[in-house]
Amino acid sequence: MKGYAMLRIGEAGWIEKAEPVCGPLDAVCRPVALAPCSSDIHTVYEGGVGERHDMVLGHEAVGEVVEVGTSVRDIKVGDRVIIPAITPDWSSIAAQDGYPMHSGGALGGWKFSNTKDGVFAEFIHVNDADANLAVLPEGIPAETGAMLSDMATTGLHGAELAQIRPGDTTVVIGIGPVGLMSVAGAAILGAGRLFAVGSRPTCIEVAKQFGATDIVNYREGDIVEQIMEATGGRGVDRVVVAGGDLGTFQQAFDVLKPGGRIGNVNYLGEGDALRISRESFLVGMGHKHLVGGLTPGGRRRMERMTELVLAGRIHPEKMITHRFTGLEHVEDGVELMRQKPRDLIKPVITV
Ligand code: NDP
Ligand code: ZN
């Protein structure tokens, strides 16, 4: 089969690979809608998770099931399914501990385009099919479904990690597609004043539609100064980090009130150590929390995302700015994610 792959750090291209073999609990799908992720760019061009050779890229997909294993009960050949970016082994101890995304070791639920071939290929292998695949409801277009596989669940996870409470003054740093879904998630969880930090006009427009009350442009001034001024020096209760770099965490700690929480979903592809000043850590006694996490995946999580779409609470389709038809255009989509033109939020490739 044909697939668009990471050849080595710094290089991607088309390769031929053997078709996947379907084990008893597995399914094999053909792609229906695919989306490249910023994570694909970190992985190939920054070597974020280390060297990989001839590994098919991509982890955001809606597919059509073409084969199921002998022990698969719910998923049927012909089903249109959301293939989540994170496909844990649900019988693992980590899953029983409440962290299925770390099944089989740290980040082990992230298999596609990390430890096995991803979804940018003619066939996609899915482990634990009944526990990982969610049938796409009638009424949700495939391209919208593809936005749920990673962007919606990851963005919402940022808001969950920050444990946003009703009325919390919240800032979402980074409003690419992940941060935009964090803005939507913060709004759903009941954030009060909701700052969104970014600069691309298309993203800013959607951030407002998703519930941002204030826009902070990080290119036009220091975000700490802007947020402290806007809050009368009080700072914020919650921060979701969905963009920026290692230096962003110092800014997050600087704007955070005592007792505040930072939820990070940004993939830190470059840099060395995270440094937080003693002062902004309130000399070690400020009850400031920082947690970073890989999104949950799996069937039930995807079903929850579809419930949010069907109830009209999230509108991930508004993030689709570029559309292609044909598997061969995966390459164009990846290149767009690499270049990040100002009018881009998210490309989708319909196959
Ligand atoms: P984008 O590149 O589209 O968005 C990044 C955002 O951060 C943009 O709004 C950008 O602003 C802003 N930004 C960039 N630099 C700074 C800065 N110095 N200070 C403040 N804001 C800044 O990325 P995505 O939304 O596609 O993805 C976000 C991250 O989430 C990526 O690292 C991705 O790999 C990761 N990710 C994590 C997952 C997880 O499970 N934890 C899963 C999927 C993705 P501008 O408007 O100027 O572009
Ligand atoms: Zn991703």
Image (cartoon, helix red, strand yellow):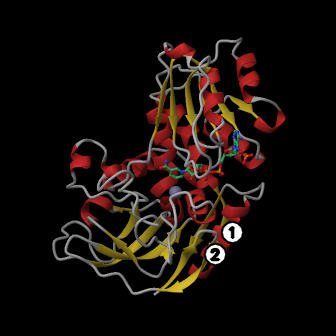
**Mark 1 highlights which residue?**
335
Q: Nearer the viewer, residue 113 or 45?
A: 45
- Residue 351 makes an appearance in the image: no
Q: Amino acid at mark 2?
A: Glu
Q: Amino acid at mark 1?
A: Glu
* Residue 49 located left or right of residue 66: right
* 126 w.r.t. 200: above or below: below
* 214 w.r.t. 307: above or below: above
Q: Nearer the viewer, residue 294 or 151?
A: 294
Residue at 57% across, 48% down: 268
Callout 2: SS: helix
Q: Tell me where residue 294 appears, x and y as whole percent.
A: 44, 47
- Bin the neighbour count of mark 1 within 10 Å (Cα to Cα): few under 14, some 14-19, many 20 and up: some
Q: Does the residue tagged 1 have its C-beta within 8 Å of any atom of ligand 1?
A: no
Mark pair 2, 1: CA separation: 6 Å
Disc marking residue 96: none
Residue at 76% across, 24% down: 226
* 283 w.r.t. 32: above or below: above
Callout 1: SS: helix
Q: Does the residue at mark 2 contact the one at mark 1 (Cβ under 8 Å)?
A: yes
**Mark 2 highlights which residue?**
331
View extreme (right): residue: 220
Image quadrant containing the C terminus: bottom right
* Residue 268 located left or right of residue 123: right
- Residue 289 makes an appearance in the image: yes
Q: Tell me where residue 110 appears, x and y as whole percent.
A: 40, 58
Q: Tell me where residue 156 appears, x and y as whole percent.
A: 48, 41
